[in-house]
Amino acid sequence: MNKILCSILFCLYCGVALATPAMVTRIVDGDTFKATVLLADGIEIMSVSVRLRNVDTPELHGECDYEIVRAEKAKQRLSELIPVGAVIEITNVKNDKYPGRIDANVFDEQNRDVGLILIREKLGRPYSGGKRRSWCD
């Protein structure tokens, strides 16, 4: 319940398009990480799960060896783009379909769109919701 409350408060504070700083605390997989969100009034929201908006990366517990190998590469690349301790910007924040997680556009310390980088490097693909395509076909 605490995670859900933090997520709701976070979305209320941030609005839809405002850039909000967040410090990366853990990389979960190729399209999800944990962060401490730093609000303008000095409030910190700890341990927020953030999923990259509009990108899908392979799953670490994938259906085939190809998916698992690609998932490990995507996670590694995400950790290079937004390493633990990095202060990044998140925008366009919305609640995710899973309680306690938010979706956001994420920009690294050089103001590059992290999701677009993963897509361009073929470690992820565009995703707009709904049923995910298999990585094993």
Image (spheres, rainbow, N blue to C red):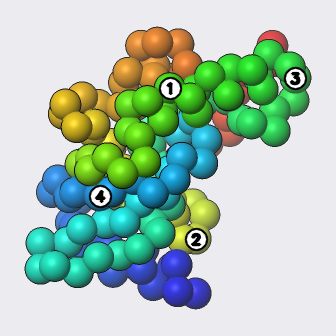
Label 1 belongs to which residue? 77
Residue at position x 45%, y 23% in the image: 118
Crowd around label 3: few <14 · some 14–19 · many ≥20 (10 Å): few
**Residue at which label 3 appears:** 64
Reading the chain from its start, which is encountered first: label 1 or label 2? 1
Q: What residue type is labelled 3?
A: Cys
**SS class, disc 3:** loop
Residue sitting at the far right: 64
Measured as percent of width and height from the top left, residue 122 is found at 53, 13
Crowding around mark 1 (Cα neighbors within 10 Å: few <14, some 14 to 19, many 20+) is some
Location of the C terminus by quadrant is top right
Left or right relative to 84: residue 43: left
Nearest to the eye among marks 3 and 1: give it: 1
Q: Which amino acid does label 1 sit on?
A: Arg
Quadrant in the picture for residue 10: bottom left
Compare marks 2 and 3 and give the one earlier in the sequence: 3
Q: In this view, does 101 lie to the left or right of 16?
A: right
Q: Kindly tell me whether residue 73 is visible in this rendering.
A: yes
